[in-house]
Image (cartoon, coloured by chain):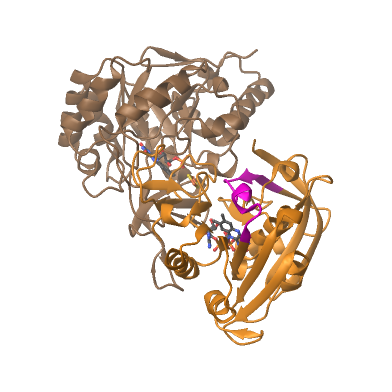
Amino acid sequence: MRYKEDCRILSQEEIGKDIFSMWLQTDRIASEARPGQFLSVYTRDASKLLPRPISICDADPEKGCLRLVYRVTGPSSGTRQFSGYHKGICLPVLGPLGNGYPMDVAKGKRLLLLGGGIGIPPLLYTARSLGKNGDVTTVLGYRDKPFMDQEFLPFGKVFCASENGDTAIRGNVLDAVRTEGLSADVIFACGPKPMLRAVKSYAAEKNILCYLSLEERMACGIGACLGCVVRSTEKDEHSQVNNKRVCKDGPVFLSDEVEL
Amino acid sequence: MKNMKVSIAGVELKNPVMTASGTFGSGEEFSAFLDLSRLGAVVTKGVAATPWPGNPTPRVAETASGMLNAIGLQNPGIDTFIKRDIPFLKQFDTRIIVNVCGKTAAEYCQVVERLSECPVDLLEINVSCPNVKHGGIAFGQDPVQLQRITQEVKKAARQPVIMKLSPNVTDITEMAKAAEAGGADAVSLINTLTGMKIDIYRRTFALANRTGGLSGPCIKPVAVRMVYQAVRAVNIPVIGMGGIACAEDALEFLMAGASAVSVGTANFHDPAATVKILEGLERFMEEQQVERITDLIRVVE
Ligand SMILES: Cc1cc2nc3c(=O)[nH]c(=O)nc-3n(C[C@H](O)[C@H](O)[C@H](O)COP(=O)(O)OP(=O)(O)OC[C@H]3O[C@@H](n4cnc5c(N)ncnc54)[C@H](O)[C@@H]3O)c2cc1C
Ligand SMILES: Cc1cc2nc3c(=O)[nH]c(=O)nc-3n(C[C@H](O)[C@H](O)[C@H](O)COP(=O)(O)O)c2cc1C
Ligand code: FES
């Protein structure tokens, strides 16, 4: 099920330059949320019409708490407004939305989590959810300073790459995978489109099962408006054309399923 | 209980609140957030004779108090629609209005003929979508073409026909009269206003299609004015829409003379917007001691 809830903000802190981490108290969303799913987040004063899709970064289903990590993209953006909401204030959200990562596929397999920039947050709950069933290696790519990298340490080996060389490895996520000679049975990736394109062709080259979490501009967020489509290799059952909805059929797709 | 009933071309609606085509799919996705049986009618996304892939992305962009869209009328085609969407909607106690699009008069008629055997209450003909290069735009912007396509569709249709007018014209009354002269049973307006947004950091258009249709609260004053003018130009019912986000907005349209209203972009901000607007209308009638919603229609002259 999906729910529209007014969620109380439990905490809000800046964890990197323009990167904010927020915990929310939910009624039902956190207990039903799966890794890789997202929320539609609305501004409180309705000054922004459309919801912002933000991934579920972490959740505590028992307590009903859920964490979002988001980047403030500009001075008059909706995310700038989110960053100004203090603890105790209620935030309107809709979720959990989308399909999420296929956790069954990763069980008992060597899983490589590849995250680029603001695509990193959803991988945390993914790593945590695998728990003891997991054999996880995480590679995180940054433009400059790392964030959240320490939080992945409990779940396996973590490698950080950065374009500006603030980290051990200079370059991007795939540079790190290659220089460290990492291999895997399954890849889950989230990040900017150029990174996902490179990951897709890397996975094809190495014959690794690969799932990508995509981004697209959204309006409804629930599959009704057809605003957020991605070209699919096969005719889609719902649309009857080669288009899938990122918000409903995704955001996670098998890499061979979509054209980027 | 207030009397919320309205009637359009002989079809009675339990209340005047409907969905705007293209913003509500065929209702399935929204049924998790509201009981579709509470709506006066569900107006479905435009459907064509064959599946259409629509435009490249980005297809949507936010603007001040509104949004631009260039979906490009992606739709699964009439076969799938009849098999899947109509049976879904039949589970609910609401009127079904099917929005139809086409690239030629023959295509419109093909869809309308297929629908004649279906349990559909009304047809809404989209002659105004500004998105598709070879789409309905020619019909919706030329009164001669509009009258002709209305006549053709009327010949093929079993259900009453609503012609959905484009606001991208100099004189909306001329278009409303052309639809009436062609035999339309009602008109609905407004569709989106053609607009453009430029992404200054990417130094290109925000939408892959370059232009898109503007909708949402920013278009409401234009829409209210056009509904007011159309109501006074023709003797068929007018359905009003454009930027309705609350009951007060809906009341403006009703008072301008609309027989019913459609809620579009507001569904993206709140999936339960339609029901909240309905409840707001009932509250207003309670406060103002109005017994029938029809007593509020066309109260301004
Ligand atoms: C499934 C999914 C999950 C995401 N998860 C996260 C996350 O966990 N953390 C995070 O920081 N960001 C995430 N994003 C990106 C995030 O949605 C955008 O950065 C955000 O919408 C920008 O809004 P704004 O108010 O800052 O910008 P504005 O410029 O005010 O936005 C204007 C409009 O464009 C849309 N928009 C702008 N950029 C994007 C984008 N990259 N993707 C989709 N819509 C966009 C906005 O939603 C809004 O409708 C995710 C996107 C998707 C599709
Ligand atoms: C995403 C989107 C898709 C639309 N698709 C259609 C369509 O398929 N057929 C149609 O006649 N109008 C379509 N419209 C226009 C709406 O039905 C409505 O006329 C317009 O958006 C104004 O109302 P609003 O401001 O309440 O959204 C669409 C509008 C939007 C925003
Ligand atoms: S945002 Fe409407 S279908 Fe995905």
Total numbered badges shown on the rendered structure: 0
**Residue under the point 61% across and 18% down:** B290
B171 is within the stretch colored magenta: no
In this image, B182 relative to A98: left or right?
A: left
**Residue under the point 58% across and 13% down:** B3
Please say whether residue B47 is visible from this viewpoint: yes
Q: Which range of residues does the magenta coloring cover? A: A92-110
The image quarter in which residue B274 lies: top right
A96 is within the stretch colored magenta: yes
Location of the N terminus of chain A by quadrant is: top right
Q: Is residue A48 above or below residue A19?
A: above
Query: Residue A84 at x, y = what percent?
Result: 73, 63
Q: Is residue A141 above or below residue B138?
A: below
Q: Is residue B170 above or below residue A173?
A: above
**Front one among B164 and A64:** A64
Q: Is residue B233 above or below residue B221?
A: above
In this image, A213 relative to A81: left or right?
A: left
| Colour seen for chain B | brown
Q: Which chain is orange?
A: A
Location of the C terminus of chain A by quadrant is: bottom left
Query: Residue A32 at x, y = what percent?
Result: 71, 41
**Front one among A170 and B48:** A170
Quadrant holding ligand 2? top left
